Image: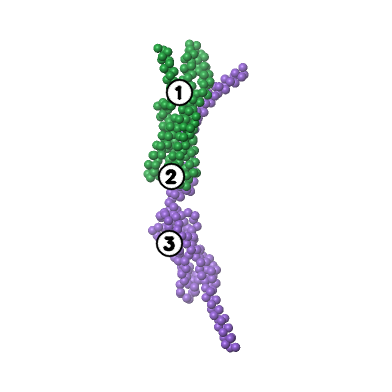
Chain colours: A green, B purple
Amino acid sequence: MSNQRSTSRDEDLLLQDFSRNVTTKSRALFSGNAAVVSAIPLWLFWRIHQMDFSSYFIHFILGTIVSTYFLNLAYQNMKFILKHKIAQKREEAVNREISKIFASDKSANKKDKDDRVLTRKNEVADFEATTFSIFYNNTFYLVCLLVLSFFVLKNFSPTVNYLFSVALSTAMVFLFSTGQK
Amino acid sequence: MFFERALIFLTILSVAFGQTDDEESFLFVTKQTINRFLVQNKEFTIKYGLYNSGPTTVYNVHLDDAHSFPIDQYELLVGTLSAKWERLNAGANLTHIVVLKPKQSGISNSTCAIVTYQKSEKNTDVQKTYSSEFGDVYIMTSREYDRRFSSHIIDWVLFTAMASPCIVFPFFLWFKSKSKYEALVTKEKSSKKAQ
């Protein structure tokens, strides 16, 4: 019985490790971040390109929804790719951390320690992958948007400027997140 | 002999009279704007230059340009669109400045100013001349002008303040975790080397 339980627990851990699915907390974090980062450039378009909300609210809403959705996907893609790389890198460090904790506990067996190491490694990799993915995608998105809107598409009409700069920068962030291995 | 002398005398007389006709003064009038861009509800300046190109003084010079800038489209701020001067000496320049403010945006056609003057004090015949013109001008909206030329420094500062937490905060969290675990590995490696 206990063997079956521990096997299913190992399987759960493996599934969690290799799954693209994110937890509810992670999903909320990604969605919130994507929405905020998509909304912040509206300030620039309102103040600098003089696009008032009453005339352009449809464009703004559409652009924000589209970029939020694809930024969310980009976060998840990049997190999945990074998690495995980070997990491999942190294995040794997490081993040492858990060994220090278990050094004082003589009753603990190797199996418990290995489980603990695997869980902890997963947690650390998850955390670092999440934060790095958010940081990297946010920076990439904002830099692309600023370059496109204020240099490349500078002399186009505000509508064309907004729609193309948001669409192109979202597309670049999303495609880059899927392309990495 | 007498006939030849009379012919020469008549020729000299006609040339002399002919020369006085060519020596009449003529006014050259220029009209230009000294602003690079015309913006709705922002002032712009028109400069009229009058130059008397002949050897004689002209009198009762009257400049009229009210037809170029109708009151429903332009607000007159400084100067007058209808000006008079008693005389303009030979070879002298005269400058007249008017400051206006356009009320509407779009393409505006500016026509020539009309200048009338008398060639002599006694002769009341009025000579009419036209100034140069600067043709069609585009009056941009103030929104477009702000979009192109305002410095927007405060807007950029506020944008940076709003965007920084989205970038700095996740980076800080990631870096803190990375440093902690890398330090664990390097610390162990350095303690093993010391042994």
User: Which residue is located at x 50 percent, y 68 percent?
Assistant: B27
Q: Which mark is residue A160?
A: 2
Callout 1: few (<14), some (14-19), or many (20+) C-alpha neighbours within 10 Å?
A: many
Tell me the SS state at disc 3.
loop
Does the image show residue B164? Answer: no
Which chain's residue wears label 2?
A: A
- Residue named by callout 3: B68
Does the image show residue B94? Answer: yes
Name the kind of residue labelled 2 in the image. Answer: Val
Which chain's residue wears label 1?
A: A
Tell me the SS state at disc 1.
helix
* Image depth: mark 2 or mark 3 in front: 2
- Residue named by callout 1: A17
Q: Which mark is residue A37?
A: none
In the foreground, A154 or A70: A70
In the rendered view, tell whether residue A146 sits above or below residue B7: above
Callout 3: few (<14), some (14-19), or many (20+) C-alpha neighbours within 10 Å?
A: some
- Give how far across and how far down residue A162 sits, in percent: 43, 42
